[in-house]
Image (cartoon, rainbow, N blue to C red):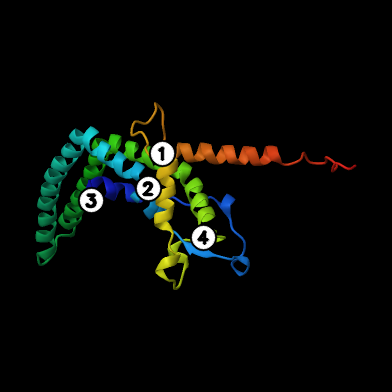
Amino acid sequence: MKKILTASALAIAALSVSPMFAAPAAAQARAIAVADVRAAASKSTAFTTASQQIQTTYKAQLDQQETRGQTLQAEMNVLIAKYNEEAKKTPQNQTALQAAAKAVQDKRQAAQEELGRIGAPVELALAYVEDQISVRMNEAVKAAMTARKIDLLLQPDAVLARENNVDITDAVVAELNKILPNVTITPPAGYKPGQLVQQHNQQLMDAARAAQPAAGTPPTTR
């Protein structure tokens, strides 16, 4: 499970709340709170359940990735040892030293690419899970703000000092669990990471444009 959660943190780090829920200026806000939407996403029932499902469904790939990673690390250690031996020589043979350094670099790059190919199905499944959560996060945030009469919501890293009772992250988690109790871990054919969020944002933009009066249309008068 740790492997999945570590990998997913990279994608969840980019998760944010859409500006469409921008609140009034701080001076006008009647109630201010903070919430960590990244933490809320990772604590949600949908994410934790999906992580467990991925751990089971992709066990073969995860086991292969771990076993192969250990082998590749052992091979890397041999090359690093050869480089260190060359570096200790006096005088140093710069040609041999550079060749040893290049061997380490090439091995590292090849190892990363190989492990990436093995774990690609896992990463895609995680991306799809996170994408589904990201699309519904705004609803959870808005619901938590409404329930607690919050006018202005900030990310924790934007606050210099605060009391613990202004953190409504758990409230966001609770709302997210209501809105999105579960997600699927099987991406549709042709799915690309971030695709759902892009589509959702485009739909919001299209709806906003459609709601605006056509340019040049005079206001209705009576």
Of residue 161 and residue 79, the one placed in the foreground of this image is 161
Q: Quadrant of the C terminus?
A: top right
Residue 39 higher or lower than 177, as above or below: below
Spatial separation of the CA atoms under disc 1 and disc 3: 29 Å
Label number found at residue 105: 3
* Extreme-top residue of the structure: 189
Q: Residues within 10 Å of mark 2 (few under 14, many from 20)?
A: some
Q: Check disc 4 and report the residue beneath it.
A: 153
Residue 130 higher or lower than 169, as above or below: above
Looking at the image, tell me whether mark 4 or mark 3 is earlier in sequence order: 3
State the count of labels: 4
Q: Residues within 10 Å of mark 4 (few under 14, many from 20)?
A: many
Spatial separation of the CA atoms under disc 1 and disc 4: 27 Å
Looking at the image, tell me whether mark 4 or mark 2 is earlier in sequence order: 2
Can residue 109 be seen here? The reply is: no
Q: Where does residue 83 sit, x and y in percent of width and height?
A: 14, 57
Q: Where does residue 64 sit, x and y in percent of width and height?
A: 16, 37
Residue under the image location 18 percent in, 33 percent down: 60
Of residue 218 and residue 44, the one placed in the foreground of this image is 44
Of residue 78 and residue 197, the one placed in the foreground of this image is 197
At label 4, which amino acid type do we have? Leu
* Extreme-right residue of the structure: 222
Spatial separation of the CA atoms under disc 2 and disc 1: 9 Å
* Extreme-bottom residue of the structure: 161
At label 3, which amino acid type do we have? Gln
Label number found at residue 11: 2
Residue under the image location 12 percent in, 52 percent down: 77
Image side of residue 114 versus residue 9, left or right: left
Q: Check disc 1 and report the residue beneath it.
A: 193
